[in-house]
Image (cartoon, rainbow, N blue to C red):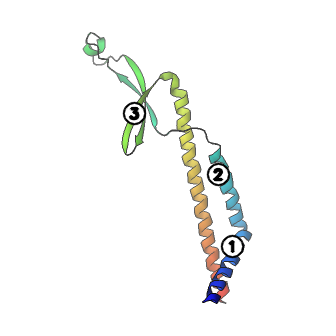
Amino acid sequence: MRYAILHFTMDNHNLKQVFDENPDIQALLKDFEKAKLELLAIEPFRKGSILKRWQTCRKSTCLCKKDKTFHNWPYFSWTLKHKQKTVSIVIPEEFLTQANHYIQNARSVERTIQKLSDISEKIVQKQIQLTRQFLKNSKI
C-alpha cells in the first residue's frame, strides 16, 4: 500500500513539472497575472443604470396637475437589483458624471472577472489534456 501512495505522489510531482514546463500554460498564467493586476487597480464601483424621468409635484395649484403633459423637472434615478429586488435612488444631476464613472468601473470589473474565468477554463482544459497524455505515456 505504501508503494502505491509513493508512486501516486511521484506521478503528481512529475505531472506538476509537466504543467510548469508547458509553454501554453505558462503563457496563460502570465495573462492571468495581468488580469489580476487589472482587478487590483479598480476604483470604487456600483452596478445599475441611470434613468431620466419626469415627475409631477404634489402642489394642488401647480400646472402639472391641470395639464397632464406638463412636468416640473427631470430627475435622475439610479436603479439596480439588490437581493432580487429593484432599488432606485434619486441622484442630483451634478452627480451624473461620477455615477456613470462608478457604473463603468462595475462593467470593467465584470469584464476582468470574465477574462479571469476564461483564462482559468483554458488552463484547466490544457491541464486535463496534459494529464491524459501523461497517464497514457506512464502506462507504456
Query: Helix, strand or loop at disc 2?
Result: helix
Q: Quadrant of residue 67?
A: top left
Name the residue rendered at 60%, 67% in the picture: 124
Query: Helix, strand or loop at disc 3?
Result: strand
Coordinates of residue 39 in the picture (x, y in percent): 62, 47
- Which amino acid does the dot numbered 1 rest on? Lys
In the drawing, does residue 51 fall left or right of residue 135?
left
The residue wearing badge 3 is 88
User: Which residue sits furthest top?
Assistant: 61
* In the rendered image, the vertical position of residue 124 relative to residue 80, given as above or below: below
Name the residue rendered at 48%, 22% in the picture: 93
In the drawing, does residue 1 fall left or right of residue 90?
right
Coordinates of residue 63 in the picture (x, y in percent): 30, 11
Mark found first going from the N terminus, 1 or 2: 1
Q: Cβ–Cβ below 8 Å for labels 1 and 3?
A: no
The residue wearing badge 2 is 36
Q: Quadrant of residue 69?
A: top left
Q: Quadrant of residue 77?
A: top left
- Which amino acid does the dot numbered 3 rest on? Ser
Coordinates of residue 57 in the picture (x, y in percent): 32, 17
Question: How far apart are labels 1 and 3 at the CA level?
Answer: 50 Å
